[in-house]
Image (cartoon, coloured by chain):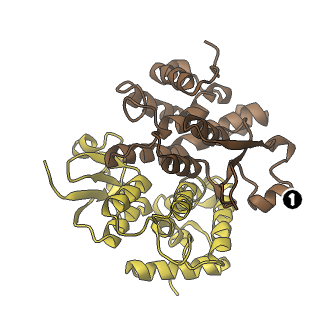
Chain colours: A brown, B yellow
């Protein structure tokens, strides 16, 4: 069996957009299959046959095998396409992985977490874990420190690290974070958005 | 400048042990530099010169460059040593990455989080986020499902995925999780401990 790469995703999810933008950046020929999380489209019998955990993004590779976890999909696509985004130099490469793992542990839980609850579930701050705001701000401050030194997170070139981190950073204001406090992060968001051909997520 | 790989870590931290066990498994010649987190040894001026964020594990590579994030260190060591633990087949390799990213997002925060608060800070359950217990159990249940099918997380061979996930799973009981409810996970823990030459963390 051989077909076209399929990416199942919902554009409200930064995790899904990471996989999509990586495929776009690499110039891959793929099919985007939109699923609406809030309408329960990731919980249908049809989709649960593809991914029993009902999570997106889910990639169905050209040979029919399934791959999950946004950052694992990004790495797989970049390694398979061999066209940038993941440096070949071992140290530069390790720096990209460092940001990808850090994102899952120290950025996404707080920044995407607050945004989903505030912008999609309509929770107010009192209902959201009080630690998430300072932890999200600490993540943004760490990025600010890095981006004062280099244009992109790992140096002069756009890599998977930037695509991964921009997904929720560009909509951090929807979770109550003030990007104006992190000017280097804000300038980097605009630069990555331009690199990916995206409309700015935040009003100027 | 050329020297020996140095790994700064504290054996109470599963994240540090992941890096150490990977180096051991690959047969690397390295120096383990023990730091006591609870005594503040990761916050000394000397260590902050090496890692300004004061986090461990921290690797100082033979050329003197610094690498952080436990899973990024594991991947870098395995890719540099080219001796197993990270498959060359693109799909098998992607499965390993899937588990590594999942661990940082869906396992470590809850299982390591509860264990640190209960076993090292002496907090009782009332002081710990009530979501962490069910979320940690959901992570263990997901592993149970996978380990009912294969001996190791990605198939018949030990990979970085097993070393990564075993670090906090083997001491999950210290965080109030009952491994007896997950017999395939428990059997896998014992198997990985044997593979790594470790004393069992849990009484039989």
Task: Name the residue: 49% across, 40% down.
Answer: A160
Res. B200 image quadrant:
bottom left
Task: Name the residue: 41% across, 64% down.
Answer: B18
Task: Name the residue: 31% across, 49% down.
Answer: B42
Counting the numbered discs, the total is: 1
The one of B76 and B66 positioned closer to us in this rendering: B76
On the image, the x and y values in percent for residue B198 come to 39, 79
Task: Name the residue: 54% across, 65% down.
Answer: B92
Q: Relative to B102, is A15 above or below? A: above
Q: Relative to A93, is B10 above or below? A: below
Q: Relative to B166, is B63 above or below? A: above
A108 left or right, relative to B48:
right
On the image, the x and y values in percent for residue A129 come to 65, 41
The one of B137 and A75 positioned closer to us in this rendering: A75
Q: Which residue is mark 1?
A: A45
On the image, the x and y values in percent for residue B103 come to 55, 58
Q: Relative to B92, is B76 above or below? A: above
Quadrant location, the N terminus of chain A: bottom right
The one of B39 and B171 positioned closer to us in this rendering: B171
B129 left or right, relative to B2:
right
Res. B10 image quadrant:
bottom left
């Amino acid at each position: 069996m051989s077909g076209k790469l399929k990416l199942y995703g919902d554009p409200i999810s930064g995790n899904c957009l990471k996989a999509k933008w990586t495929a776009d950046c690499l110039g891959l020929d793929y099919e985007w299959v939109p699923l609406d999380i809030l309408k329960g489209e990731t919980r249908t019998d049809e989709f649960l046959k593809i991914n029993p955990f009902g999570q997106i993004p889910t990639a169905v590779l050209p040979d029919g095998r399934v791959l999950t976890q946004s950052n694992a999909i990004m790495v797989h696509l970049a390694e398979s396409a061999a066209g940038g985004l993941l440096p070949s130099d071992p140290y530069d490469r390790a720096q990209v992985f460092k940001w990808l793992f850090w994102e899952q542990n120290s950025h996404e839980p707080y920044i995407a977490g607050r945004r989903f609850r505030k912008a999609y579930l309509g929770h107010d701050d009192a209902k959201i874990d009080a630690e998430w705001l300072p932890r999200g701000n600490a993540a943004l401050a760490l990025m600010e420190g890095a981006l004062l030194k280099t244009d992109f997170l790992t140096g002069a070139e756009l890599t998977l690290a930037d695509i991964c981190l921009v997904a929720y950073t560009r909509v951090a204001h929807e979770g109550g974070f003030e990007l104006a406090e992190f000017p280097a992060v804000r300038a980097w968001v605009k630069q990555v958005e331009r690199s990916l051909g995206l409309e700015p997520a935040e009003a100027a």
